[in-house]
Amino acid sequence: MTGLESLGVASMEFGFSPEQEAIRESVAKLCSDFPATYWRDVDERREYPEAFVGALTDAGWLSVLIPEEFGGGGGTITDGALILETINRSGCASVAAHAQMYTMGTVLRHGTDDQKRRYLPEIAAGKLRMQAFGVTEPDAGSDTTRISTFARRDGDEYIVNGGKIFTSRFQHSDLLLLLVRTTRYEDVTRKSDGISVLIVDLREAGDSITVRPIQTMVNHETNQLFFDNLRVPVENLVGEEGKGFRYILSGLNAERILVSSENLGDGYWFIDRATAYASERVVFGRPIGANQGVQFPLAQAYAQLEAASLMRWKAASLFDRGEQPGFEANAAKLLASQATWAAANAAMDTFGGFGMSVEYDIERKFREARLPVVAPVNNNLVLAYIGHGTLGMPKSY
């Protein structure tokens, strides 16, 4: 028995199947229709990349995780990770559409058969979008158990009051996956109890939701939401009432894996661009890449990206086997964000003044690379989770 087998791991493969290589080639080909000029334009105008998201939808890439019986691709989280990495490595931005992949985890694993029949075929066909995910609240922050948005049962409906912040893509979504309290914090024994998940049909919400857009340093449409007697049918409750916290956690593992993958795509994009530029740019009679001050930071960042990528694939493999890879998914997010930020800084240093110029695209991607360090979960919270949840040290929060 090998060392890996003694740990319960039969084998480890570090390549892609012919089908996955075909996925990567097809996605890259689609992305080639959206060159840097397209992304500069939507960034300058602060517009949602509607044409790009439409192309991804029409090609079926956003429904790859939906089972074939509901009209989707029947793919794995590994397939989804490969798609998002390829999008960002091609210079595009999957953040405009990625939520539709990771929200699927909560619905697929915990939704009712009726909910799956009602929504999944329409999402797979591109007739519905589930791009919005309402979790964070201004006063709770990362302490999700402290959310106060409350859903009161009223016959066959819930009446929701409260608010969310940093809810992205609301204006481009038909459905909102919403985390609420159905039992108040002070009335539960365990603080994670009394939290439920609702599917909100935004087409029926009317004026019961007020939206305040939040302008950020990147072209990432996000909002603050206010709920005023929002009525949601009880049939839109995902799973059991009061057990939504664990449903969201299982979905967040998928989110971490997918976000890590698009982040890694950005990191590889920085390395691809910077190494090509360093080999071509001649100063003092030789390519600047011959200087160790330029070469070593790029090499270091690339090594970090490769290590982070392996952790990401390990997390994806465990998830695809039906396990909940809490450590691996969070570690992948941590390592990917750190490696990509290192690659971003190395690329900016390599391009020098030209890196600040819009036409070279480094500054746009540089701004985008900072976000994953703090969102969708702050790296310090990931470290706290690993310290307590994995290493068994005293809880720090």
Image (tube, helix red, strand yellow):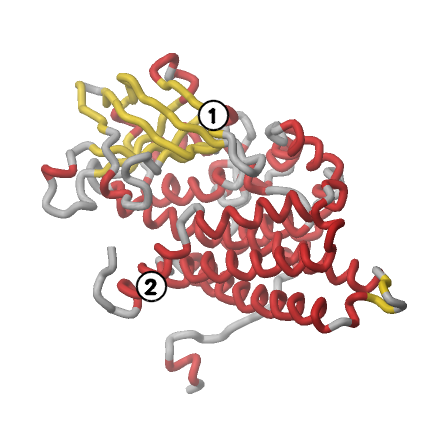
Q: Which residue is mark 2?
A: 386
Relative to 31, 14 lies left or right: left
Relative to 380, 271 lies left or right: right
Name the kind of residue labelled 2 in the image.
Ile
Give the percent coordinates (x, y) of residue 9: 42, 74
Give the percent coordinates (x, y) of residue 201: 39, 23
Along the line of sight, the residue nearer the viewer: 356 or 128: 356
Quarter holding residue 271 = bottom right
Residue at x-position 67% and y-position 55%: 348
Image quarter (top left, top right, bottom left or bottom right) of the C terminus = bottom left
Q: Which residue is mark 1?
A: 213
Nearest to N terminus: mark 2 or mark 1: 1
Relative to 145, 118 lies left or right: right
Relative to 51, 234 lies left or right: left
What number is the disc on residue 280? none
Along the line of sight, the residue nearer the viewer: 224 or 86: 224
Residue at x-position 51% and y-position 30%: 215
Residue at x-position 55% and y-position 30%: 125
Give the percent coordinates (x, y) of residue 342: 58, 60
